[in-house]
Structures are given as C-alpha cells and as structure tokens.
Image: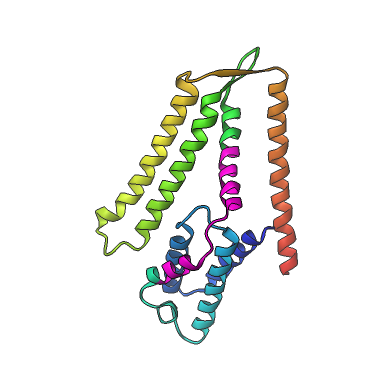
Amino acid sequence: MKKANQYQHEINQLKKQLHKSDLVYFEKLQTYILSQNVFYNEETINLQLLSMLQDLIDAEKEHSDAINLFGKDPQTMANEILSELPSPKVRDRLSMSSLIIIMSWFFLLLSSNHTSVGMELNLLAFILVPLLELIAIQLVFRILHKSIYSKNPSRRQALLPKLAVGFIFLFCVGIILLINNLFSIGPIFVLPSPWNLFILGFILIATLCYFFYTLASQHYSRNQRS
C-alpha cells in the first residue's frame, strides 16, 4: 500500500476517537486543505494531517479540544500550512492528469460504437473529454474550497455550492454525450477486428489485476499493523 493511502487509512481510524465537535472541526480543516489543489502531493498532505490529528487526540486526553489546540481561526492556520507546502511537482501534476486521461479513455473505449467491421473511435472525443474533465475537477475543487469557511452563510448561500457542483457535473455529462454519441464530431478511426476485442480484453485483465492488487495491498497493510 502506498504511504499516502496508509496515512489516509490511519486518519480514518483515528478520527473515530475524536469527540463530535472536534471531529467536525478537523473534517472541515481536512476538506479545506485537501481541496486547495488537486495536484498537491497526497503523501505530504496526509502526513501533515495525520500529525495534527495525533496532536488533537493527545490534547483530548488532557481535557483540551481543537479550538484550544489550533485556535478559533482554522482557515488562517490552514492557509499558513498550505503556504509552507512545496509547490506541486511536475511529476505529481502529470501523475494526476495521466490518471484522469486514462480513466476517460477507458470509458470512451467501452462506450465506443461496435460494428461488424470493428470499433469506431471518435478521435476528437479522446482529446476533448479528458480536457473537459480536468477543467471540471479543478472547478469543483475550487468551489468546495471556497465554501468550507464561508462567513455566516445563509441557507440559500450554503446551497449554492452544491447547485454549482451539480450543474458542472450535468453540463460535463451532456457535453460528453454530445461529443461521443449524438454527434459525429471530428474524424472517426475504425479499429478493425479482432484488435478491438484484444483491447477490450486487455482492459478487462488490467482492471481485474488492479482490483486484486489493491485487495492484496490492503490485506498486507492490515497484517503489518496487527
């Protein structure tokens, strides 16, 4: 299991020990920090959050709480933490972007039109769809980040971020359907049989390998902790 995932698992387990008010405080802080930039190194952030969580648990044992430990202005404290984090490396940016692109291509391949000749691939969709998803994810993270510590939001104002995220999701789905299914935009490349079957088989095998690898990693991690 990657260190980032291990740290996240430890955070999830330790949060169960927090008092309710401190749990709300920490989860808002966690969401604010994680939503600042999707390209930040996950391992670095999770390690920082894990250290803060351990300090908070120790403080509760001394009959203190999150406000006494971290202060009444968690947003300012979180901004100071974020300012001290190293800027996202090119490797981290490429890693996250590549994951999004690969997932997009994966679903585009599965949803491509199959004929007796082979698989029809909309080349423009393989460019525009990942780009659209990258932009949408950035927007969603920005909206989420800005909404965490809104100053005394009304019920209507608190609902606006959720509506905005929902609109972005529906808009992206609509555009993807238009590009990939409803309109034949851009050049179409036909992947002849049996290569289309080989590719789909490879995708299936790769997905199963990743699934079993994840299960094995989680099982190994639990055994290590026990």
44, above or below 184, in the image:
below
Asked where in the image residue 71 lies, by quadrant, the reply is bottom left
Q: Is residue 110 left or right of residue 156?
A: right
Q: Is residue 98 left or right of residue 221?
A: left
Which residue sits at x=61%, y=63%? 9
**Residue 110: horizontal and vertical position, in percent?**
60, 29
Give 205 or 104, whichever is nearer the viewer. Answer: 104
96, above or below 30, in the image:
above
Asked where in the image residue 88 lies, by quadrant, the reply is bottom right
Q: Is residue 140 left or right of residue 122?
A: left
Q: Quadrant of the N terminus?
A: bottom right
Which residue sits at x=65%, y=12%? 116
Of helix, strand and loop, which mostly describes the magenta segment? helix
Q: Quadrant of the C terminus?
A: bottom right
Which residue sits at x=57%, y=58%? 41
Which residue sits at x=71%, y=38%? 206
226, above or below 158, in the image:
below
**Residue 193: horizontal and vertical position, in percent?**
70, 17
Give 62 or 50, whichever is nearer the viewer. Answer: 50
Residue at the bottom extreme of this rendering? 62
Residue at the top extreme of this rendering? 116
User: What span is in magenta?
Assistant: 77-103
Whether residue 94 is in magenta: the answer is yes
